[in-house]
Amino acid sequence: MQRLEDALERQPPWDPPLGFVRRVVALTSVAGQQWPVRERSRRGGLLRAAAAGLAAATGAYVIAFLLSVLAATVIQETLTAIDSYAAFVELMTRVVAARALHVAWLSAAMSLSFAASLVHRVRA
């Protein structure tokens, strides 16, 4: 790549002759040419409209189907979460009921500790 750049740098700068751009544009210009007029058939327009309608209907169907699948999945996951929460609450209720004496002593100790900290703050 460096050799190519060196070779290009050794070349003298090129200045196009006067009128060069105009001649190139004239050679490539299609503005002066007459294009044949194409008649649009009624059947072609109808087919194009039918294809566009079919594509729109298919897109709407696919979107509706995907939304229904998404809604069903969300509802199923929500119900699973609610069932799990209900099972958790039931388990915690059993645990607390089975250890009622321990829970009572723990609650009493926490109440006394909180009351003592309040008294200590008031005196300080």
Image (tube, rainbow, N blue to C red):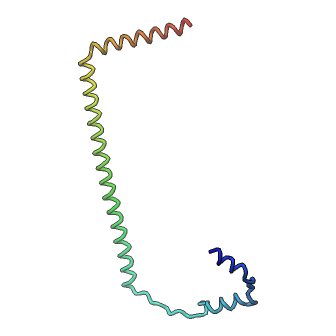
How many numbered discs sit on the rendered protein? Answer: 0
Q: Residue at x 34, y 71 (%)?
A: 54
Q: Residue at x 38, y 76 (%)?
A: 49
Task: Choose top left, top right, bottom left or bottom right for residue 42.
Answer: bottom left
Of residues 6 and 54, the one nearer the viewer is: 6
The image shows residue 120 at horizontal and vertical percentages of: 51, 8
Quarter of the figure with the C terminus: top right
Vertical comparison of 111 with 26: above or below: above
Is 2 displayed left or right of 13 in the figure? left
Vertical comparison of 108 with 30: above or below: above
The image shows residue 123 at horizontal and vertical percentages of: 54, 5
Of residues 72 and 17, the one nearer the viewer is: 17
Vertical comparison of 69 with 75: above or below: below
Is 8 displayed left or right of 102 in the figure? right
Of residues 53 and 74, the one nearer the viewer is: 74
Q: Residue at x 36, y 70 (%)?
A: 55
Is 65 displayed left or right of 11 in the figure? left
Q: Residue furthest top?
A: 123
Q: Residue at x 70, y 87 (%)?
A: 21
Of residues 6 and 89, the one nearer the viewer is: 6
The image shows residue 83 at horizontal and vertical percentages of: 26, 36
Task: Choose top left, top right, bottom left or bottom right for residue 77.
Answer: top left
The image shows residue 5 at horizontal and vertical percentages of: 67, 76
Quarter of the figure with the N terminus: bottom right
